[in-house]
Image: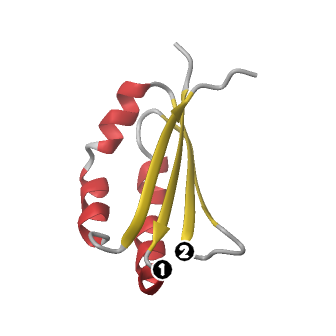
């Protein structure tokens, strides 16, 4: 089975950018240490500081699902409740 690529776009509310950024940054070291995590990179848009992008690669969907159910993801969700304006997530497969 091919690796799973995740592209997540997070748009913070204008008055919550610093909070969302801080909470996203907390996820990086813990997630990178998880079983199955190949790549977990956080980006912030140069022209729109409210827009964050996570680019992730996982060994498989099962290990990514384990990540999505991990305590640190629940803690992020609780800490940023009401602070995120929009969230989109795409599960993708590398084809070339």
Q: Which image quadrant: the C terminus?
A: top right
Judged from this view, the residue extending furthest toward the bottom is: 15
- Residue 10's spot in the image, x, y percent? 48, 61
Q: Tell me, for residue 66, which label it has, or none.
A: none
- Name the residue: 23% across, 66% down: 78
Q: Are marks 1 and 2 in contact (CB under 8 Å)?
A: yes
The residue where tag 1 is placed is: 17
- Badge 2: residue crowd in 10 Å (few <14, some 14–19, many ≥20): many
| Mark found first going from the N terminus, 1 or 2 | 1
**In this rendering, is residue 15 above or below 9?**
below
**In this rendering, is residue 46 above or below 35?**
below
Total number of numbered labels? 2
Q: Nearer the viewer, residue 95 or 3?
A: 95
User: Quick check: 91 left or right of 30?
Assistant: right
Quadrant position of residue 2: top right
**In this rendering, is residue 37 above or below 21?**
above
- Residue 41's spot in the image, x, y percent? 59, 53
Distance (Cα) linking label 1 and label 2: 6 Å
- Name the residue: 43% across, 62% down: 86
The residue where tag 2 is placed is: 50
- Residue 25's spot in the image, x, y percent? 48, 67
- Badge 1: residue crowd in 10 Å (few <14, some 14–19, many ≥20): some
Q: Mark 2 falls on what kind of element?
A: loop
Q: Mark 1 falls on what kind of element?
A: helix
- Name the residue: 41% across, 80% down: 19
Quadrant position of residue 62: top left
- Residue 28's spot in the image, x, y percent? 48, 58
């Amino acid at each position: 089975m091919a690796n799973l690529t995740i592209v997540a776009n997070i748009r913070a509310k204008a008055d919550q950018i610093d909070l969302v950024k801080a909470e996203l940054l907390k996820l990086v070291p813990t997630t990178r240490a998880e079983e199955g995590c190949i790549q977990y990179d956080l980006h912030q848009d140069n022209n729109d500081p409210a827009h964050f992008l996570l680019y992730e690669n996982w060994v498989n969907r099962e290990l990514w699902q384990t990540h999505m159910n991990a305590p640190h993801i629940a803690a992020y969700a609780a800490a940023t409740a009401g602070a995120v304006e929009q969230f989109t997530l795409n599960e993708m497969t590398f084809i070339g």
